[in-house]
Amino acid sequence: MLRKLSTDKAPAAIGPYSQAIVAGDFLFASGQIPINPANGAIEAEGIEAQAQQVMKNVGAILEAAGTDYENVVKTTCFLADMGDFAAFNSVYEKYFTEKPARSCVAVKQLPKDVLCEVEVVAYLGGK
């Protein structure tokens, strides 16, 4: 059985998708960009600040599912510029301390011209 998950502590879906879906023991979260959920604006400038906001948004979705970063099994990271790889990693590693499996790619453009986006899959262990 699939269950849609939504929280006002992360940016609302702005298209035909859900913030996250719980399928069995797994949470599949849509990609998060550095939108401030309180006002819907992109306030953060620079890769580190944008990555911090992305991680806050990911954390809010994980919390709404009753889990945290430790139970993330896979991330997919999108960067607008691979030159930001090291700076992005310096923020990423503070949150994903269990070192989940990961893909990280540079893309031509991200929504709203942000610098990074992260999606996660987390194991809920029957929660």
Image (tube, rainbow, N blue to C red):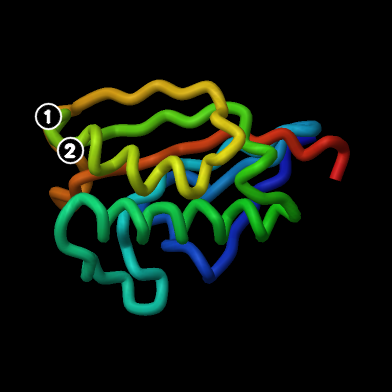
From this viewpoint, which residue is outermost toward the bottom?
Answer: 39
Question: Residue 1: where, in percent of width, then height?
Answer: 80, 34
Mark 2: give few (<14), some (14-19) or many (20+) Cα within 10 Å.
Answer: some
Q: Earlier in the sequence, mark 2 or mark 1?
A: 2
As displayed, is residue 104 above or below residue 70?
A: above
Q: Which residue is mark 2?
A: 84
How many tags in the picture? Answer: 2
Q: Secondary structure at mark 1?
A: loop
Crowd class of label 1 (few under 14; some 14 to 19; many from 20; radius 10 Å): few
Residue extending furthest toward the right? 126
Horizontal placement of 82 versus 48: left or right?
left
| Quadrant placement of the C terminus | top right
Q: Which residue is at 56% across, 40% downward?
A: 97
Q: Secondary structure at mark 2?
A: helix
Location of residue 116 in the rendering, given as x and y in whole percent from the top left corner? 26, 43
Question: Which residue is located at x 36 percent, y 33 percent?
Answer: 77
Q: Amino acid at mark 2?
A: Asp
Pick the front one: 7 or 76: 76
Q: Looking at the picture, tell me which residue is in the foreground, 48 or 23.
A: 48
Q: Position of residue 52 (x, y in %)?
A: 36, 57
Q: Amino acid at mark 1?
A: Lys
- Residue 49 occupies quadrant: bottom left
Residue 26 sits in which quadrant?
A: top right
Label 1 sits on residue: 108
- For the residues carrying marks 2 and 1, which lies nearer the camera in this image? 2
